């Protein structure tokens, strides 16, 4: 028996060799992009999923009316070749490309969009992104079950290729929202074949079942191994596609991902381990990428409880944090100190707000609030979800507050779901939070802090702030709109129901032979523009 | 008293009958055990704060209500449990809440082969190392070659995999950097550290059990007779003594294999291996109720089955147990 054991064991050790897989060199020759894509996606149904991982695959498979501009923050035509906007900004007519077809050859029609938008707004589907279409007239009411007749919702097919969208009010960022996968079309017959419009657990996203309209079609999906897509020859612009396929690898371990990249199994390294950032930056400057990202890391304050309801206390807490030291010595991932809630962008929206590090002013304000040198200030809890990075930041901030203000803070880490539950129940004093905008517009951040918004969770509201946002929504010119957002941002940074800490960055590696991959704040890289140099 | 001949010819029939009775009886006791496990797991996962659809992108109350309705999570818990049991008996473990469109069975099917492979290598490693060192120790009682493997095995028993794993990673993966520290079948040698981490505690137990069993057998008359007849030592040890000496190890094999599946939760998480152990841990964090329950049922089933198989094997190999009819 032991002989058999011995043989089997030797076999076991010998079988520890690696799987057959494509390396970058041969992938370049075949035009196949090998992507480290973080984790296994929740799914590939554009109306169900919510994550970044999913986004990166879905934009290969589907195409919305508009598309993210690969080079910047704007949009370019996608499935719609053009559109017109009425003078009041409320009516949009989209002309869908004549040659836009589904992967089975069916023409892509305006009716397909009507069906798809009906699907994401159908309450029973339980989509978490219906609000991407709330700008459409009556869409929110339909989604919330207040009306049952979808004909009342502002989307209709005027003919096979013309889609009319009526908005409830002028919404300048609506075209950007149309580049988001939540608004993408799905193939109605396929949806109906696999359980109908409200079936969340449908099998239509499986390789053999999926009919899509994007530049690629799904060819393989092995759970936790790989998702492969091939060039869609029926795509309207397939002649200009340079890639023949993409392999998405769900590698959620940073160390494994690093090994994949170094051994030439992927064209990118999605996340660089913190301790390797400076090494890679110096040794591989051509491959190392450090780019701005449309996200903010912040602390959320429960303004319903004393003494955090006092704006002076909140200001003192913010003034005692040296954000520059924090990003230089603690996070060390090239993050930028955040002085506004919305991440600034030089060519679009750059709020003039500033959150200085001024311990003496902080102490004065705290004394004015009735707590000289922190005396009498109740010890409070700083809540975060269990994560080493969050812990380091929390410890640093705990030290700032203790050293500069004499305030004692208990750090509490809980698992993700408990953290979410406590936040939504308001059972916290201060929690860490992060937000990544879905489209590059101040609205995707500032709207969150309007009174009673689901993601506000601070108990804070300010009627003037809400009014500025309302005015921004109705403003006639882009300049006015930005001015209103700026005013709202000033109020937010003055009252500080949230304390911004840093603006996110994307730090990753990309092989030099990948061309047409441009930096942008949403970290979206449409594959239509990417090529591989041999 | 039956004659020797008669006893031998009727043994298979007798044994088979006893065996069938024994298995049926055991399976009957499985039912309440399974029910208790499912119910306890069910109520515990539902008692944990947060739900499967909580997200940092807060959904409106209307949508949450819809989602809960879709999956019948608004029903009273006892009704949900009843429905779950009815479906589970028919082999339907429900959809995963975290991965819409995937069933629990499908996810388990994708992770199970990896966990089985890991457990298989770990048990081979444990048997080989454990039995060999047990034999060496038993042949040198009270000497250095007894103390050395036994001391190491004591350490092996005492150090849990949650500590051993990171130590091995630190040493082989970071300091001397010769082995990958995560994954399974992705890079050469990435199966070695998880196998050792999972198997070593059992290797240690097997070593002690084998040593004990061997010492007992080696002291018996038939071994003395074998040696007196001039058989060489290898033959005495491996063909005569080991058959009896390995009995305690065989007896422990079932619980050990079952334990390996449970241990894979820790090891798969440390080495980020996508087997059912890691799925289980992630499902618990995601409050993916159905996936947690599905894997709990599977692990319970494995535990009960392997304990049963090991009892049968031990009885079959041990004539004393066989004849006394221990299968009661």
Image (spheres, rainbow, N blue to C red):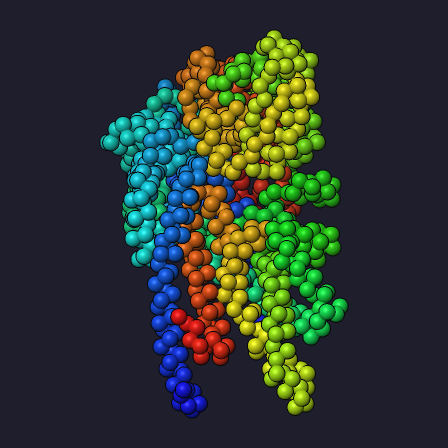
Does B82 appear above or below B151? above
**Residue A318 visible, this orientation:** yes
Q: Which residue is rendered at x = 47% and y = 45% of the image?
A: B284
Extreme front residue here?
A: B1
Left or right: B243 with respect to B99?
right
**Foreground of the two, B20 or A370:** B20
Extreme top residue here?
A: A368
Q: Which residue is rendered at x = 27% and y = 27% of the image?
A: A146
Residue B143 point in image, percent of width and height: 75, 70
Count the numbered circles shown: 0
Q: Which residue is rendered at x = 34% and y = 23% of the image?
A: A168
Left or right: A176 with respect to B236?
left
Does A140 appear above or below A378? below
**Residue A439 visible, this orientation:** no
Screen quadrant of the C terminus of chain B: bottom left
**Foreground of the two, A103 or A326:** A326
**Foreground of the two, A524 or B291:** B291
Residue A235 point in image, percent of width and height: 42, 47
Residue B199 point in image, percent of width and height: 60, 61
Extreme right residue here?
A: B144
Residue A200 point in image, percent of width and height: 35, 44
Does B16 appear above or below B251? below
Q: Quadrant of residue B295?
A: bottom left
**Foreground of the two, A285 or B84:** B84
């Amino acid at each position: 028996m032991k002989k058999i054991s011995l043989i089997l064991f030797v076999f076991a050790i010998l079988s520890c060799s690696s799987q057959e897989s494509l390396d970058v060199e041969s992938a370049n020759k075949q035009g196949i992009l090998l992507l480290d894509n973080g984790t296994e996606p929740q799914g590939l149904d554009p109306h169900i999923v919510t994550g970044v991982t999913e986004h990166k695959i879905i934009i290969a498979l589907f195409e919305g009316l508009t598309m993210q501009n690969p080079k910047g923050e704007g949009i370019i035509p996608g499935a719609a070749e053009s559109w017109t906007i009425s003078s009041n900004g409320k009516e949009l007519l989209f002309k869908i490309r004549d040659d836009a077809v589904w992967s089975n050859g069916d023409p892509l029609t305006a009716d397909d969009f009507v069906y798809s938008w009906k699907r994401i707004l159908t309450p029973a589907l339980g989509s978490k992104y219906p609000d991407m279409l709330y700008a459409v007239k009556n869409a929110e009411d339909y989604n919330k079950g207040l009306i049952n007749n979808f004909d009342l919702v502002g989307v209709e097919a005027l003919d096979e290729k013309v889609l009319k969208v009526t908005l409830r009010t002028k919404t300048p960022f609506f075209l950007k929202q149309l580049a988001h996968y939540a608004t993408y079309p799905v193939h109605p017959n396929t949806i109906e074949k696999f359980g109908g419009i409200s079936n969340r657990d449908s099998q239509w996203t499986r390789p053999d079942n999926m009919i899509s309209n994007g530049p690629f079609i799904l060819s393989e999906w092995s759970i936790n191994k790989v998702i492969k897509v091939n060039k869609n020859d029926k795509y309207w612009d397939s002649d200009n596609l340079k890639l023949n396929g993409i392999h998405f690898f769900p590698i959620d371990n940073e160390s494994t991902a690093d090994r994949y990249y170094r051994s030439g199994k992927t064209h990118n390294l999605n996340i660089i381990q913190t301790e390797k950032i400076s090494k890679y930056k110096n040794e591989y400057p051509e491959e190392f990428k450090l780019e701005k990202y449309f996200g903010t890391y912040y602390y959320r304050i429960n303004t319903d409880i004393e003494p955090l309801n006092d704006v002076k206390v909140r200001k003192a807490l913010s003034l005692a944090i040296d954000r520059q030291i924090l990003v230089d010595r603690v996070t060390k991932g090239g993050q930028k100190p955040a002085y506004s809630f919305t991440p600034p962008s030089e060519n679009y929206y750059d709020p003039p707000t500033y959150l200085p590090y001024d311990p003496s002013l902080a102490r004065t304000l705290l004394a004015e609030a009735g707590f000289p040198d922190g005396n009498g200030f109740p010890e409070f809890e700083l809540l975060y979800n269990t994560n080493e990075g969050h812990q380091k930041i929390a410890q640093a901030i705990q030290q700032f507050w203790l050293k500069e203000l004499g305030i004692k803070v208990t750090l509490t880490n809980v698992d993700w779901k408990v953290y979410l539950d406590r936040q939504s129940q308001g059972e916290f004093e201060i929690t860490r939070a992060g937000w990544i905008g879905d489209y590059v517009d101040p609205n995707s951040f500032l709207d969150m802090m309007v009174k009673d918004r689901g993601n506000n969770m601070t108990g804070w509201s300010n009627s003037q702030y809400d009014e500025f946002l309302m005015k921004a929504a109705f403003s006639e010119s882009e300049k006015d709109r930005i001015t209103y957002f700026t005013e709202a941002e000033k109020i937010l940074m003055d009252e500080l129901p949230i304390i911004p800490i840093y603006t996110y960055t994307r730090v990753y590696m990309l092989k030099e032979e990948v061309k047409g991959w441009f930096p942008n704040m949403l970290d979206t890289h449409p594959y239509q523009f990417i090529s591989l140099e041999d | 008293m039956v004659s020797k001949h008669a006893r031998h010819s009727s043994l298979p029939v007798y044994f088979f009958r006893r065996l069938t009775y024994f298995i049926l009886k055991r399976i009957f006791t499985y039912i309440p055990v399974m029910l208790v496990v499912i119910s306890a797991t069910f109520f515990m996962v539902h008692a944990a704060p947060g739900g499967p659809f909580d997200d940092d992108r807060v959904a409106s109350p209307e949508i949450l209500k819809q989602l809960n309705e879709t999956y019948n999570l608004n029903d009273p818990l006892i009704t949900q449990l009843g429905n779950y049991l009815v479906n589970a008996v028919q082999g339907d473990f429900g959809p995963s809440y975290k991965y819409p469109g995937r069933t629990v069975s499908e996810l388990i099917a994708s992770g199970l082969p990896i966990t089985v492979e890991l457990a298989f290598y770990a048990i081979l490693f444990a048997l080989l190392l454990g039995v060999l060192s047990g034999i060496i120790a038993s042949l040198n009682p009270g000497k250095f070659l007894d103390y050395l493997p036994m001391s190491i095995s004591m350490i092996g028993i005492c150090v849990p995999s949650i500590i051993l794993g990171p130590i091995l990673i630190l040493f082989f993966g970071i300091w001397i950097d010769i082995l990958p520290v995560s994954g399974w079948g992705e890079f050469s040698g990435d199966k070695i550290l998880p196998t050792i981490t999972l198997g070593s505690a059992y290797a240690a137990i097997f070593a002690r059990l084998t040593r004990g069993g061997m010492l007992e057998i080696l002291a018996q008359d038939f071994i003395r007779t074998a040696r007196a007849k001039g058989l060489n030592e290898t033959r005495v040890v491996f063909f005569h003594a080991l058959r009896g000496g390995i009995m305690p190890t065989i007896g422990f094999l079932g619980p050990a294999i079952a334990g390996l599946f449970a241990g894979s939760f820790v090891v798969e998480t440390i080495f980020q291996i996508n087997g059912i152990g890691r799925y289980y841990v992630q499902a618990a964090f995601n409050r993916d109720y159905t996936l947690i329950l599905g894997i709990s049922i599977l692990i319970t089933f494995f535990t009960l089955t392997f304990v049963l198989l090991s009892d049968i094997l031990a009885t079959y190999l041990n004539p004393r147990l066989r004849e006394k009819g221990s299968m009661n």
